[in-house]
Amino acid sequence: MSERFEIKENEHGVVRLFTVDLPEAELDEFADDSDVPSALQEALGVDRLNMEFVELFPVSTLEGVGLAGYMVDGLGVSEAEVEEDRARLEALSGTVLVLLSSAFGGHAATLTPKPPLRWVGTYTEERAPVSFKPLPSESARGTTGGKTPPSDAAMSGRVASIALLVLFALVALIVWVAA
């Protein structure tokens, strides 16, 4: 394969889909991460991989939902993005590998997949649009910019401190004159 994928540091929300051309009997050994590096890591060309964010399963297990439905409902990929590839995704059979961004643990990596992997597509998880609406509660608004005036207790404390300093200075002056 000539595909090469650059994974950016702290990448999130990207789903990479591959087919795996192996018999079902060999899948457990392929994904076994007790060997370092595992056969899967070697096939992807990476040093580290968090298997909690890697899914390897036969497409036939998605009966009724289909791979396209799983991508949208299970992985949160936008329906519009999946719709472009729906026919190709539904035509896939055998085993697929779903590789989520979190599998790289926030580290940059370069994927150079080789057989038995074949890249199918890269998709992004749908994100809610960011909106900056005012907060509904007056107390949640707080104040922005400028200082708040000191409270009465703070002012009383400052006045008392200054009065004590003046008294201390007067006592020191009387003691010095008397000596």
Image (cartoon, helix red, strand yellow):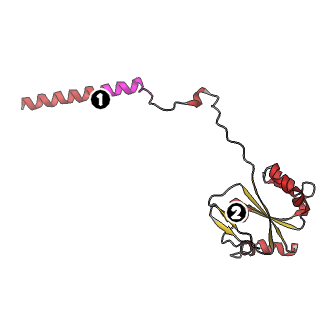
| Residue type at tag 2 | Ala
Local crowd size for mark 2, using a 10 Å CA cut-off: few (<14), some (14–19), many (≥20) = some
**Badge number at residue 103:** 2
58 or 173, which lies in front? 58
Looking at the rendering, which quadrant does residue 37 occupy?
bottom right
- 156 inside magenta stretch: yes
Q: Residue at x 72, y 57 (%)?
A: 14
Mark 2, secondary structure of its residue = helix
Say which quadrant the N terminus sits in: bottom right
User: Left or right: 178 with respect to 8?
Assistant: left
| Residue type at tag 1 | Ser
User: Left or right: 22 with respect to 137?
Assistant: right
Judged from this view, the residue extending furthest toward the right is 64
Q: Name the main secondary structure of what is drawn in magenta.
A: helix
- The mark nearer the N terminus, 2 or 1, is 2
Please provide the residue range marked out in magenta: 148-159
User: Left or right: 5 with respect to 20?
Assistant: left
Depicted 24 relative to depicted 78: above or below: below
Query: Could you say where residue 87 lies in the image, as x and y percent from the top left?
Result: 90, 58
Q: Which residue is mark 1?
A: 161
Q: CA distance from mark 2 to mark 1?
A: 60 Å
Say which quadrant the C terminus sits in: top left
Query: Could you say where residue 44 lies in the image, as x and y percent from the top left?
Result: 73, 71
Mark 1, secondary structure of its residue = helix
Local crowd size for mark 1, using a 10 Å CA cut-off: few (<14), some (14–19), many (≥20) = few
Q: Residue at x 45, y 28 (%)?
A: 148
Query: Could you say where residue 111 lies in the image, as x and y percent from the top left?
Result: 70, 69
139 or 179, which lies in front? 139
- 82 inside magenta stretch: no
